[in-house]
Amino acid sequence: MADNSIGTPEQLRDPNYTPALQRAIPLGIQHVLAMFVSNVTPAIIVAGAAGFGFGSNSPDFPELLYLIQMSMLFAGVATLLQTVTLGPVGAKLPIVQGTSFAFIPIMIPLVAGKGVDGLAALFGGVIIGGLFHAFLGLFIGRIRFALPPLVTGLVVTMIGLALVKVGIQYAAGGVPAIGTPEYGSLLNWSAALVVIFVTLGLKFFTTGMLSVSAVLIGLVVGYFYALGVGILDWAAVTGSWERSAAFALPQPFKYGFEFSAAAIIGFCLMAFISAIETVGDVSGITKGGAGREATDKEIEGATYADGVGTAFAGIFGGFPNTSFSQNVGLIAMTGVMSRHVVTCGAIFLIICGLVPKVGGIIRTVPIEVLGGGVIVMFGMVVAAGISMLSDVNWNRRNMVIFAIALSIGLGLQLEPGAVAGFPDTMRILMTSGLLPAAFIAIVLNLVLPEELADESTEEVSGGMAGHGDGSLPKE
C-alpha cells in the first residue's frame, strides 16, 4: 500500500521523484535487504562446486570472501546503471540488479572440482556473455516470440530443479561432510529447520518489511541458534572479523582470463533467457508502480545495463547480473516508483562490497543454516516456473514439447555420465541440463505445427494424457 506521507499519489508514480533523504535511505536499504541473501548465494555455491567453499578446508577458502565482496559491489554498480544511467545504458527506473541464479547450472560444470584454477574460464565466459547480452538490447523486442511461457516456464523450473539438491546437501552438512557421521545429523538439520520455520512464520503471519525480509531474518535467527548449540564457535566469528580488511578495492582479472568455448556458448545462450526475464521485470515495474506499459527505450536501456553490468563485473571477479523479480513486488507493495530510492540502496550495496568485513561475517554463516535458506529460495524458483507454466495452453502439442525437453534436460542433469564420451565443450553444456532443455523447447516450438491430434499422444501417456487447457476455471 502506498504511503502518502512520502509524497502525493502523482509523485509516488514518478520515477524521477526524489523523496526526503530520511525516507529515501530506509526505503532503499529495504530493497537491498529483500535481495541480499539471493545476491551472495551464487558465489557460495560456485565456490563449493569448485572445491574451496564451506567445510572444504581448502587453502583457497579465503577467496570466497572476495567473491562475496564482488557480488555485493557489482550488484550495486549494475543497479546504479539502471537508475542513474550512462548514455543509452539503463532504464531510468527503480530496477534492482543482483547475481542471477539462472547461470548457476552453467557455472557448476565449468568449475566442478577445479578450485580457483577453474575461475579464469568462468569469468572469461561472464565477460563475453555480458557483451553479447548488451548486444541483445538492439533487437530484444524482436526475439520475444521465440520465448513464450512454455519455454521460459520450463527454463525457470529447470533452474530450480538443478538447485534443490544443493539446498538439501547444505542442510545436511555440505558436500565435504558426505561420508562422515556428521552428515545428515539431527543437529545439522535442526539448524536448517529453524531457518525454514522462522521464514515461513514471517512470510505467512507478518506483513511489510518483516515479510519481505523473511529469509534474511530466518538466517540471522539460525545463525544465533548455531552459536547457541555449538555448530558455530564464537571464536571463528571474531577471528574472521579481525582477519578481514576494513576496506579493499576490486582487482581486475584477479583470476586471469581464459577463452572457453563451453563457457562462452553457455553464457551467451543463457543471456537470451536473462534478457527476456528483464523485459518481464521492467514491464512489471511500470505496470505495478506507474500503471503503464514499459517503453521500447526503457526495455532496451535495461537490457544494455544487464549486459554491461555483467561484463564489467566479470572483469573484477563478479558473476552475471540481472534484474531481481522480488523487488518488482516490493515496488508494488510500497507504491514508491522513485528510481532515486533504489539509487540509495545501490550505494549501500557498493559500500558493503568495499568493506570485506561484511563478507567476513557472511563467510562464517554455517552451511547448515544457509541450507535452510536456500531450500526455501530454490523451491520458490521451481514454484515460479510452475506459475509461469500455468499460462500455457496445455494442448497435446505443448505437452509433447514439454515432455521431450524436460526428459532430456533433467535426465542429463541427473545422469551426467551418460555423455562422458562426448567432447569436453559439448559435455559441459549438456550436463547443465538447462541448455539442452531450453534448446529443444525453443526449436520444437518454432518448427512443429500448431495442431496435434488428441489420439496421437494416448499411446505414450500411460493413461495420464491430461485434458486441461491451461486456463483458470470459470466462475
Image (spheres, grey):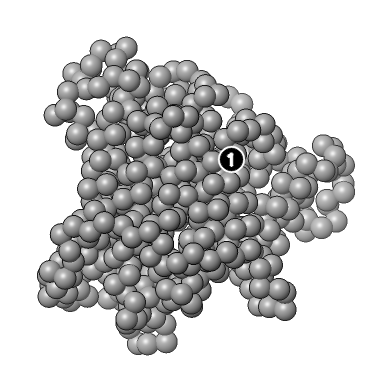
Answer with left or right where residue 26 lies relative to residue 63.
left
Query: Residue at position x 82%, y 58% from top?
Result: 460
Q: Is residue 347 above or below residue 246?
A: above
Camera-side residue: 138 or 5?
Answer: 138
The residue where tag 1 is placed is 135
Q: In this view, does 250 lie above or below 383?
A: below
Q: Position of residue 461 (x, y in %)?
A: 78, 56
Query: Residue at position x 38%, y 75% from top?
Result: 52
Viewer can see residue 335 = no
Q: Position of residue 180 (x, y in %)?
A: 37, 87
Q: Where is residue 67 in the image (x, y as percent from the top left)?
A: 35, 62
Q: In which quarter of the image is residue 234?
A: bottom left
Camera-side residue: 282 or 349?
Answer: 349
Viewer can see residue 378 = yes
Answer with left or right where residue 204 lies relative to residue 144.
left
Identified by mark 1, the residue type is Phe
Q: Is residue 1 above or below residue 233?
A: above
Answer with left or right where residue 253 lies relative to residue 157.
left
Classify mark 1: residues with Cα within 10 Å, few (<14), some (14-19) or many (20+): some
Query: Residue at position x 42%, y 82% from top?
Result: 178
Q: Is residue 116 above or below residue 140?
A: below
For the N terminus, give its image quadrant: top left
For the C terminus, give its image quadrant: top right
